[in-house]
Image (cartoon, rainbow, N blue to C red):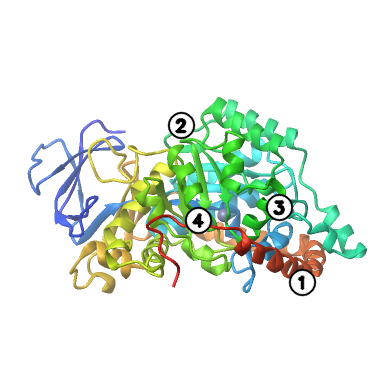
Amino acid sequence: MANSPTVITGGLVLTAGSSQATPADIVLKDDTIAAIAPPGQVTSEAAQRIDASNRLIIAGLVNAHTHGHGGLAKGAGDRWSLELLLNAGPSLNGGRTDDDRYLSTLLTAVEMLRKGCTACYDLAAMLPVPTVEGLHSISQAYADAGMRAVIAPMIADRSFYQAIPGLLDAFPPELRSIADAIQMGPGDATLSAIRAAAASWPHSDDRIRLGIAPTIPLHCSDAFMCGCRDLAAEYGLPLQTHLAESSVQRAGAMRRYGMTLTHHLDKLGVLGPRFSAAHAVWIDADEIELLARHGSGIAHNPGSNMRLGNGIADMRPALARGVTVGVGTDGSSSADNQNMFEAMRLAAFVSRVFDRPPDAWIGAVEALQLATEGSAAVLGMAGLIGKIAPGYKADLVFLDLDHVNLVPLNNAAQQLVNGEDGAAVRDVMVGGRFVLRDGTLTGIDWPRIVERARAAAARLTETNAATRASTERLASIVSRFCVGLGRCAHDVPRKLAADGGEQR
Ligand SMILES: [Zn+2]
């Protein structure tokens, strides 16, 4: 990389905490922002110049929770609860080759980049057990797209059917045998594969980092969860789990552990600064307190929570208590698009359904901060990405000021959060290098990827047809049982934070 500085000139720059963008030049040294300078101040002949006139420049958005494996399964399901989605999991994500994993992740990465997102936390499913080669295929997709990522294999040692207390017994014998046949790989083999991947991880920590994702606490035996905890500690891996995403999970925890999920994880020693909770819809004030005390984070996915009927996660009490909150889209089978502009907007809007005055709502500047710096902290990349400031990586999104979304530009932050849909994104830079330039992806042959992805999806539809047919037979019992169990969550006293507004 050139040693002479690069200067991005002529743009309007939106910095953290501001609602208005101002004319400024951004000076880059290698892959890092060296300075923000008044326009025209850098006069060095040696400096390379990038013309950003007519562009609004913002920090790359960061997706705190997604699933690259959703890329090939988009459009699946409609009136699906989380539990119906999990019932369909083997038919959506099964039978995949490493090339399928690469393609699915690449589709997800491309959508994120095109919509202004430069880094993500990917909880990657690999059934029945993860492999080092599979993880490398997934990381190659991010490397080719030019995106930063945490890749956390999504793992468990219990099937969904084993995880929900009482569910297996709800099936008549002919259906129970279908549910019994769906098994996770042995926990030891799963953990060994991740250990092997961690010991030889080929990417630098600031580009593509390995994480670990014991998928849902109820799906993990205590021994397995502790194995994940120990691997995370040994290799410094970020650890994320779907925490209290549905009422079923809260009620299931009370049945299995006699305590909330967060208290259970605390008892096992899983909470800590490397820990983040995806969703956290069904947590109470004591659980927020635990997360705050351990310096843990939350990945807030309001679109997914509404799509799957899980409810609305209330972030204000967590923010007030100092919990790090990032924003995520969730995967393409549950959210569905990978549009961080929409996720930010929903994070702002859903904060207004609780009985609180407007000054307690999440506003545009705060929503942007959560979707950049907040998510960066969830990825374990605080101080590295998520901000246009000296010392931060040059992950920048350039929006076309002539696009109708931004004409006229009255208030940059408010228009980006409340109105932008990603259509005004023209260029995206990651680490000082354009990965999207004038609307074209620079690292991949898109027409070829389109062909391969269509072929893979068609083949997987056929491969998984029998699994789909059999899990569909389970769906009505799964749904009925889980609706009943989820209602029990309302019987568990749920202590609201002192400033916690009741949902309207
Ligand atoms: Zn998820």
- Nearer to me, 246 or 301: 246
Residue ID for mark 3: 255
* Secondary element at image label 2: loop
Q: Quadrant of residue 494?
A: bottom right
Residue 229 image offset from top left, x and y in percent: 60, 33
Rendering coords of residue 282 (x, y %): 55, 57
Three-letter code, disc 1: Ser
Taking the image as shown, residue 24 lies to the left or right of residue 260, namely: left
Q: Which mark is residue 476?
A: 1
Q: In the rendered image, is residue 441 in sight?
A: no
Q: Nearer the viewer, mark 3 or mark 4?
A: 4
Q: Nearer the viewer, mark 1 or mark 3?
A: 3
CB under 8 Å between discs 3 and 4: no
Picture residue at 63% right of the left edge, 35% below the top? 228
User: Residue drawn at (87%, 64%), measured in percent from left and top?
Assistant: 175
Q: Earlier in the sequence, mark 1 or mark 3?
A: 3
Distance Cα–Cα, label 2 vs label 3: 42 Å
Residue tagged 4: 495
